[in-house]
């Protein structure tokens, strides 16, 4: 382990345990429109995945602590434990491991991706051991842990205090699907990030440096490049599509190939083995640590083999986990320590790491959750200095032409967190109280290569990743800190202040700024060579209509089309205040990404201000894959000047209408009274018991589209 690393880990542990105390399992609402959502399969006290012979003694959070509470923490049943050797590299512990356990070097053979790397392990990485329980027939029991820890206690070079279960920690969001509706949303998204001129710039100024963007998510390069394979979860591909739309508007192959997918979420549920090709919907801290290491080492290998390969690297982490329990953030123990070291190694190689700040797990009751998710919370930790990188033994490839160390006065955290705003610079309805960093971006209606609109801080993170790639490609001599300083300084200053950050002072908190792609590029290229475009733009206040007029017009056109089969319903009851429990439900560090296909990505509320009757409209067309699978539906709205949330519990007739779409019904329309709605979301309960929360657009009524009256024709003369 590198000299000084344990001191950094101790500082990180004290900070994370003392300040970043959180209590959920995801970045977003349950199976929400971001990669951060609660896993409905999480084992809870009294039942779930760990009922059965031999496993009943493994108790969930809130129950009496089991004998290995310090090592297993809030993850009873975890089949991988990570520890740190004091010396040597033998993770088999001299062959003394029980027959059902294997021990391997985490960063050498923990995944196919790291196994394929050719560079020797950097200093410190060889000390991390992954101990895997290999019996696939049943659940792991206390006796199995006892057998492992008995061997560990006898090992002279491995302390039990360095070991911890590798918890699931990162996760990751004619009808209303008429192309005109998707086009309207895409235009609004592009305008709100200030990149509607991106295609022309990318076409006219194609000669730029190569910047690689690694999307650490649910997809692997192998699955995306093989037509015979389909990723289990599309979130990673969707994030890559968003980044490509910003970095490569002209869709040039040499640009698109620089957006690479790295598997970080290979697991489908709590007990399943990882699928390193098709991927899954959740991952562990160890999985993420290996993905970070694989991305950096793979990029280094490409640069060593080809001098013209990408000279800069951006890591996009549209994922995160709730930090429940000290073990989840204890950087003296294996899983968190492995991730910390991998992030420090990335920073010392000049990489820029971006992470989603996260959303609440329940749109109705946001106050049950607080603060950012990890690893976005690592923004409170400083990036290693040049001297510290040297002490670690981490050497960058070309610091002469591509410097790494941040200049004096730069804002240089280990990770840059990204918050999500809507089209009017308001936090999304599922924003976490106390979870807004100083940098935010549009997190609504993100469309990549498809027509499914996504929402959440995953989208915001992808926006910043694409922006950083654009800026860096024209100014490769800048450090990661300088790129982010440029992006932040030229963003639009909102009226809000950051809730956390490096050196955060609540009494003098930084202003939250919204990213403008065009303004960042303009500032970066001012006074540079003619090859660096200066588009002449600056960040501006939100448009009065949020650039949603084209979208609203397209929706109105669909509704006025005689061929559209509209099924109308009236919600006779008023919205009622959401009822919230006193505390968040029991959770673990399990998290899941957003579903591959949002249920209702084009759904919208059209309000008619100034009235007190049911003349506002909820318009819904759900994705075909979900027709017949909806069992309950709630509309959650945030009203103007109101602190609490209100809900409409929609009735069985509305549910039946949704489940009939694709046949006799194109659009389900519900009339209700919500004239003061500012933002909203739909909470779907499906037949399998899972819950998905979809943000909905809120627009103001526009006049129906009228076809022009035909001009009278003269009567024929005899």
Image (cartoon, rainbow, N blue to C red):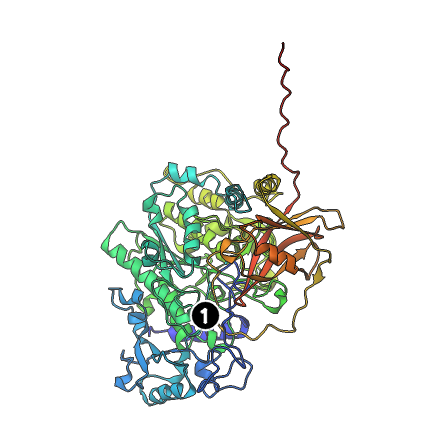
At 30% from the left edge and 66% from the top edge, which residue is drawn?
112
Image coordinates of residue 448 in percent, x first then y, are 45, 49
Q: Residue furthest top?
A: 718
Relative to the observer, which residue lies in front, 144 or 382?
144
Relative to the observer, which residue lies in front, 573 or 507?
573
Q: Disc 1 on helix, strand or loop?
A: strand
Relative to the observer, which residue lies in front, 406 or 355?
355
Q: Which residue is mark 1?
A: 169
Image coordinates of residue 152 in percent, x first then y, are 34, 86
Report the quarter where the N terminus lies: bottom left
Image coordinates of residue 319 in percent, x first then y, are 46, 62
What is the count of numbered marks? 1
Q: Is residue 29 visible?
A: yes
Report the quarter where the C terminus lies: top right
Relative to the observer, which residue lies in front, 572 or 199?
572
Q: Is residue 123 visible?
A: no
Q: Residue furthest front?
A: 718
State whether residue 285 is above or below residue 673: below
At 60% from the left edge and 54% from the top edge, which residue is drawn?
657
Image coordinates of residue 202 in percent, x first then y, are 39, 40
Left or right position of 233 against 322 = left
For disc 1, the neighbor class at 10 Å (few under 14, some 14 to 19, many from 20) is many
State whether residue 157 is above or below residue 677: below
Left or right position of 573 against 134 = right
């Amino acid at each position: 382990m590198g000299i000084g690393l344990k001191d950094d880990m101790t500082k990180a542990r004290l900070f994370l345990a003392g300040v970043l105390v959180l209590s959920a399992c995801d970045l977003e609402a349950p199976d929400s429109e971001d990669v951060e959502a609660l896993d409905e399969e999480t084992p809870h006290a009294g039942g779930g995945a760990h009922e059965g012979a031999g496993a009943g003694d493994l108790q969930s959070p809130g129950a009496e602590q089991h004998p290995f509470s310090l090592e297993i923490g809030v993850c009873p049943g975890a089949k991988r434990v990570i520890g740190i050797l004091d010396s040597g590299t033998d993770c088999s512990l001299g062959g003394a491991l029980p027959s059902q356990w294997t021990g391997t070097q985490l960063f050498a053979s923990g995944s196919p991706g790291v196994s394929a790397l050719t560079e020797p392990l950097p200093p410190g990485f060889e000390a991390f051991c992954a101990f895997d329980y290999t019996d696939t027939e049943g659940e792991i029991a206390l006796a199995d842990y006892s057998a492992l820890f008995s061997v560990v206690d006898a090992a002279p070079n491995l302390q039990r205090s360095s070991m911890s279960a590798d918890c699931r920690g990162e996760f990751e969001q004619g009808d209303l699907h008429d192309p005109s509706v998707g086009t309207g949303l895409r235009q609004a998204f592009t305008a709100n990030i200030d990149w509607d001129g991106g295609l022309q710039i990318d076409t006219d100024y194609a000669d730029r440096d190569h910047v690689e963007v690694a999307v650490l998510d649910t997809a692997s390069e192998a699955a995306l490049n093989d037509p015979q394979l389909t990723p289990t979860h599309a979130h990673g591909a969707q994030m890559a599509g968003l980044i490509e739309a910003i970095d490569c508007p002209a869709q040039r192959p040499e640009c698109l190939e620089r957006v690479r997918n790295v598997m970080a979420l290979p697991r489908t549920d709590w007990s399943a083995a990882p699928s390193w090709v098709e991927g899954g919907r959740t991952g562990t801290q160890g999985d993420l640590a290996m993905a970070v290491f694989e991305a950096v080492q793979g990029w280094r290998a490409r640069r060593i083999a080809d001098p013209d390969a990408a000279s800069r690297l951006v890591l996009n982490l549209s994922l995160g986990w709730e930090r429940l329990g000290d073990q989840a953030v204890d950087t003296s123990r294996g899983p968190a320590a492995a991730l910390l070291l991998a992030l420090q190694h990335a920073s010392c190689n000049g990489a820029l790491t971006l992470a989603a700040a996260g959303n609440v797990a329940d749109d109705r009751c946001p106050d049950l959750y607080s603060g950012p998710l990890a690893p976005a919370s690592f923004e409170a930790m400083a990036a290693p200095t040049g001297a510290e990188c040297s002490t670690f033994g981490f050497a960058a490839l070309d610091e002469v032409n591509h410097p790494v160390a941040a200049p004096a006065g730069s804002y240089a955290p280990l990770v840059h967190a990204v918050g999500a705003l809507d089209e009017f610079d308001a936090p999304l309805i599922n924003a976490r109280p106390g979870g807004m960093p100083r940098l935010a971006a549009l997190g609504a209606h993100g469309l990549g290569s498809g027509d499914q609109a996504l929402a959440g801080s995953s989208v915001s993170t992808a926006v910043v990743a694409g922006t950083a790639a654009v800026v860096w490609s024209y100014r490769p001599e800048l450090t990661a800190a300088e790129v982010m300083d440029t992006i932040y300084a030229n963003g639009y200053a909102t009226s809000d202040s950051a809730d956390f950050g490096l050196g955060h002072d609540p009494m003098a908190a930084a202003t939250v700024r919204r990213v403008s792609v065009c303004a960042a590029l303009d500032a970066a290229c001012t006074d540079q060579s003619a090859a660096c475009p200066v588009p002449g733009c600056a960040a501006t206040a939100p448009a009065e209509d949020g650039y949603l007029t084209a979208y609203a017009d397209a929706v109105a056109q669909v509704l006025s089309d005689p061929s559209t089969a509209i099924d109308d319903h009236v919600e006779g009851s008023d919205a009622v205040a959401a009822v919230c429990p006193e505390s968040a439900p029991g959770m673990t560090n399990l998290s899941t990404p957003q579903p591959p296909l949002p249920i209702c990505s084009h759904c919208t509320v059209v309000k008619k201000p100034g009235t007190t009757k049911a003349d506002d409209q909820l318009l819904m067309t759900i994705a075909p894959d979900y027709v017949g699978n909806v069992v309950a539906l709630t509309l959650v709205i945030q009203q103007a000047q109101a602190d609490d949330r209100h809900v409409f519990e929609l009735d069985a007739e509305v549910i039946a209408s949704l489940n009939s779409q694709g046949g006799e019904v194109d659009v389900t329309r519900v009339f209700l009274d919500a004239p003061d709605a500012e933002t909203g979301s739909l909470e779907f309960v499906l037949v399998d018991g899972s819950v998905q929360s979809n943000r909905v657009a809120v627009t103001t009524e526009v006049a129906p589209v009228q076809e022009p009256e035909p001009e009278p024709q003269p009567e024929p003369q005899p």
